[in-house]
Image: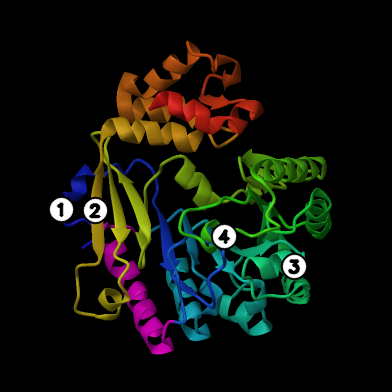
Amino acid sequence: MIMDEIALDKIDRREPFALYVHLPFCHYRCHYCDFYASAGVDPQLRRKVIARILREITNQLAYLHMERLVSVYVGGGTPSMIDGDQLSALIDLVQSYHPQQVTIEVNPEDVSKDLIDALGLARWQNLRVSMGMQTFHQASLDAVGRKVTTQQMFDALELLSPYKARLSLDLIAGLPFHTQAIVESDMHRLVTYRPAHLSLYALAMEEGTVLTYRHHPHLPNEEERSIQWQASQRMLLASGYQQYEVSNYALTPNDYSLQNTHYWQLKPYIGIGPGAVGTLPLLDGSALRITGRREFGVWSNPDDINLWHRDMIERESFIFEHYMMGFRTALGISKAILKERFGDAGLAPWEHLQKSKWREFLQEDDRYITLTEQGRLVLDAILLDLL
């Protein structure tokens, strides 16, 4: 079982649980992606792995005595590429735990009437779709290995238009061939379409990705990528979107991602699937991090029970994670949660920062501690001061 090395009564159950389901299958690998996923997996092997994932969702939630979930996120990989019958079975299964919100990632080239029917978008009013657009500039898409056309993107947006109140779109600034004018054109298209939620990222050069070891001659430098991201941010704010986290924007608080908010507040969640990560806070202030083994052979064998790697996060490290994640958000970190989980030690990093050169970037009220907007721009440097 997912927690056979620790007693269930040590789990901190004061907060509701969330579930992350990882489907690590892709049509192809994008050149900027460092997520765990594989392209070209045999369809029969893929079906066996997904069948095991469905089984483990039921088994592990029963073991943890979880009858309800606050939210569910289905990511990858590319969940929209799996067979429609298994996709429908997955959505129906997670909906049986009565979550407030379910989110599933899709690629534009997979969006069709059949996919919309398989997801049950018309049926499930709590179901959100997160679609990775990244850019409408075809040369940039081609340069990063995206096998999608801008016309396919427009077609996907048209098909999803009735559901855009439950649609989240991703954009990346700083891709090869990007200029500020191109990025602003991308943003104009998206804010005109007006989905409920947008995620805006500056391209990160992650170790091990194609973009990192095969440097593209038309890749903007780090300063140019930052300028493009900030220009996009200004357009979003001017268009009425609220920035509730470093990279995330919504039209209203009701449009926030519950799953991401759960992560940023270090509330308990479990991950099911190859490479899926979950974190369970414990009553002593430490936490258990559980990661699904990556080998497909393990997941495709119905008799193999050794599915998980487990790591203890010591109390001091878990306190730091609260600051690392919570400072990303506009709301910040709950003083009550820090006090409840860690006692006086929970606010010690804040007291240190109040005496440091970063104090001008801090703000607080009776309930929360957080960074100013300028402070979030130098978040990495502030966190280094806490290590």
Q: Nearer the viewer, mark 4 or mark 1?
A: 4
Residue 209 rendering spot, x and y as whole percentages: 50, 60
CB within 8 Å, label 2 to label 1: yes
Residue 263 rendering spot, x and y as whole percentages: 46, 46
- Which stretch appears magenta? 41-66
**Residue 96 seen by the camera:** no
Q: Nearer the viewer, mark 2 or mark 1?
A: 2
Q: Which residue is mark 4?
A: 211
Q: Which residue is mark 1?
A: 5
Residue 61 is inside the magenta segment: yes
Question: Given the image, on which type of amino acid does mark 4 rest?
Answer: Leu
Where disc 1 sits, the SS reads loop
Q: Left or right: where does residue 344 sit relative to residue 379?
A: left
User: How busy is the neighbourhood of tag 3: few (under 14 within 10 Å), some, or many (20 plus)?
Assistant: some
For the N terminus, the quadrant is bottom left
Seen at 61% across and 48% down, the residue is 256
Pointer 4 or 1: first along the chain: 1
Residue 350 rendering spot, x and y as whole percentages: 45, 20
Q: Nearer the viewer, mark 2 or mark 4?
A: 4
CA separation, marks 3 and 2?
43 Å
Q: Which residue is mark 2?
A: 310
Where disc 3 sits, the SS reads helix
